[in-house]
Amino acid sequence: MLKLADDSRPAWTRVAILSLLVLAVFRAELPEIVRVALEDPEAAHFFAAPLLVGLLLARGGRGQVPVRFKASWWGVALLLPAFLVFFVSSWPFNYAYPRRMSVIPALAGAALAAGGAPMLRLLFPALLVLAVSIPTGSRYYAFLIIRPETWTLSFSEEILGLLPGAFVELQGSDLHYERGADSGVVLLGEPHRGASLLLSGAAIFFFSALWRPAGRAMTALALVAAGPLLLMINMARMILIGILFVMTGAEVEASWPWVAGAAAALTSCWLAGVLVAQAGHVMRIAPGGRSAS
């Protein structure tokens, strides 16, 4: 756990100045991110990111072990490539998602340049939450999620096929069912439907897992556990929604199963993050990954 040294104010001033300079470079992209988040409800968690980041920053400096910040030229090694990606994806190419995401390594470089590795470790949870909150766009999202979505739908097909009197078959990217006189599509494998809550869940998971700062080992544990936990939670959500559709004969357009499933999944992501955090502290993980004992 970290406690800021008495002379840490100059480092925070440097972070603020460098971050403002970074945001000035990316200023044309920020309104576009807001526009995408306003138009796409599955990117709406972006608007919660400033609050989550602010809470993480307010929480991160509390603790028992004093830390002193020292500027590091290694920050330039992150800043320059980040700016290069931003400019290249603006011209001669036009790749929106890499252009948006390049702000994260740029901010990380600003933290490293202003306060060295201790500053970057302190700000890393906030940068992680911000990274998973940036809207991806349907094309990139489909590319990233197609394999996990295929696993989810295939496993859901096997589980739902065990329901009494139900015949379930995966046709293309949609899951069809027949049960008695009822039949139809039970789950849609669209890019923003089959796994649409993964990024929202990731933001909530990382926020709750890294709420209590515990050093590099705790962060590594959260990063390793995030993928499997989020995929399992999303798979459970899809299976439960499928059971509701098959057993009740409701139309797939009905909103209440999706709303209930989303609420349960996001709550589960929060609880999973809390459990990961508790596991890290039970193992007595101290700053730098060394056992407190």
Image (cartoon, rainbow, N blue to C red):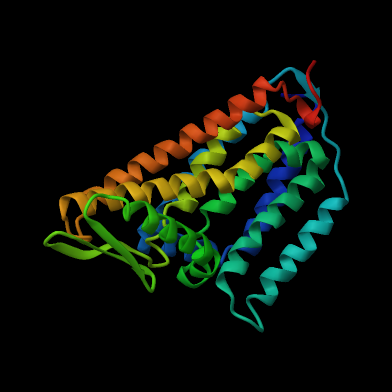
Residue with the most extreme right position: 73
Which is more toward the observer, 232 or 5? 232
Counting every numbered tag in the picture gives 0
Residue sitting at x 48%, y 68%: 137
- On screen, residue 158 versus residue 214, left or right, reads left
Q: Compare residues 47 and 154 and report the one nearer the observer.
A: 154
At horizontal 64% and vertical 59% (from top left) the residue drawn is 103
Please state the horizontal and vertical placement of residue 141, each as a whole percent of the image. Answer: 50, 66
- Closer-to-camera residue (88/170): 170
In this picture, is 167 found above or below 199?
A: below
Q: In the drawing, does residue 221 fall left or right of residue 81?
A: left
Check the image and report above or below for 286 versus 189: above
Q: Is residue 236 visible?
A: yes
Residue located farthest toward the bottom when viewing the structure as drawn: 92
On screen, residue 259 above or below 118: below
In this picture, residue 74 sits left or right of residue 122: right
Name the quadrant of the C terminus: top right
State the residue at coordinates (59%, 53%): 131
Tell me residue 1's x, y (percent).
72, 24
Residue 62 visible in the current orientation: no
Query: Residue 78: where, in percent of width, then height?
Result: 78, 57
